[in-house]
Amino acid sequence: MEIKETSFQIIADLLIARTGQQLTENRRWRIGTALSGVCRESGVENAEQLVCLLADTKDPLLERKIVEALLNNETYFFRDKPTFDQLPQDILPLLAERRKSSRRLRIWSAGCSTGQEAHSIAMDLERQQAQWADWSVEILGTDISQHALTIASRGLFSQFDVQRGLSILQTLQHFTEENDGWQLSDDIRKHSRFMQHNILDRPPSSEKFDLILCRNVLLYFDTQTRVHVLERLFSALAPDGFLMLGSGENITGLSDNFAPSNGRLSTYEVAPGLRYSSAISAAFSHADNTA
Ligand SMILES: C[S@@+](CC[C@H](N)C(=O)[O-])C[C@H]1O[C@@H](n2cnc3c(N)ncnc32)[C@H](O)[C@@H]1O
């Protein structure tokens, strides 16, 4: 059922206020379907009535459920393979060289959805076990959706999920089949931790990350919000770290803080002119944290 203009506007305003995500006119037809589960749970018949219920009750839990239902959580293991393959083949070995004195690596999967991106990196690290054996490697996955994060931490995926991006060998290597799906092994899960975080806010840690993946998240923001998020990501990235975006995203006209990384796909580094000042500020923030 087509949603009326006033209700559409209320829902679109709510989504943008909470997440920065735009509900464009061409996603309007999806609203009824996306909200059908919340309607059922709340005992109302359609999105129009749901908007009225929210207006009457101002229930924050209902508001959160509506926002979560409208987010696009699409993801899969090793998404955009040519881009992802750069990690084990090129970027992780380069970071191993750059961090060989500290033997510490920090990775942030920003807008991680149900965790496939973080867990795919963990599988890469596990394949390169000899390299990373005595390192401290942390993968932090963050998302605004608590529902998505629960799945990410639990590591229980459907048959459909494991079929997308994983070979049969990888599935059997890293998962066990259970009644209700495929359980990811502790060996892979142990590499990642997940927490709720709004990417519009300050980064989730004052310590810099060596690699940030923020893929297929900027897509739904307007230009001004993209500029803002890229500022946030810049402030979280080590001066010699890497930022990876989705294959349909780029920084053109949005940020001068980053420059494309030497022929790599969807990958950026701190712009050469800023590396020195960024390194100084990173050193000060490190000193503040250890004082
Ligand atoms: C399309 S998924 C992309 C998942 C993964 N990065 C990938 O490329 O496969 C976008 C994710 O961004 C999250 N998201 C949207 N707005 C956000 C915000 N303001 N803060 C944090 N996460 C957000 C959504 O909940 C969703 O899980």
Image (spheres, rainbow, N blue to C red):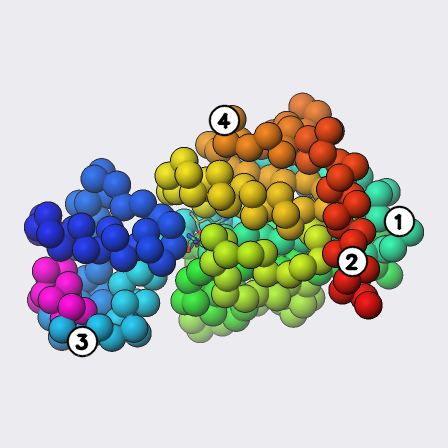
Q: Earlier in the sequence, mark 2 or mark 3?
A: 3
* Callout in the foreground (3, 1): 3
* Callout in the foreground (2, 3): 2
| Number of residues whose C-alpha sits closer than 10 Å to that of mark 3, classed few (under 14), some (14–19) or many (20 or more) | few
State yes or no: discs 4 and 2 in contact (Cβ < 8 Å): no
Magenta segment range? 45-55
Whether the residue carrying mark 2 lies under 8 Å from ligand 1 is answered with: no
* Place of residue 176 in the rendered image (x, y in percent of width and height, measured from the top left): 57, 67
| Number of residues whose C-alpha sits closer than 10 Å to that of mark 2, classed few (under 14), some (14–19) or many (20 or more) | some
165 with respect to 192 (left or right): left
Q: Earlier in the sequence, mark 4 or mark 1?
A: 1
State yes or no: discs 3 and 4 in contact (Cβ < 8 Å): no
Give the residue pinned by disc 1.
100
Q: Is residue 48 magenta?
A: yes
Q: Secondary structure at mark 1?
A: loop
| Number of residues whose C-alpha sits closer than 10 Å to that of mark 1, classed few (under 14), some (14–19) or many (20 or more) | few
Q: Earlier in the sequence, mark 4 or mark 2?
A: 4
Residue kind at label 3, given as amino acid type = Thr
- Give the spatial CA distance, label 4 vs label 2: 31 Å
> In the image, what residue occupies the spot 10% across and 60% down?
48
The residue closer to the viewer here, 236 or 176, is: 236
Residue kind at label 1, given as amino acid type = Lys
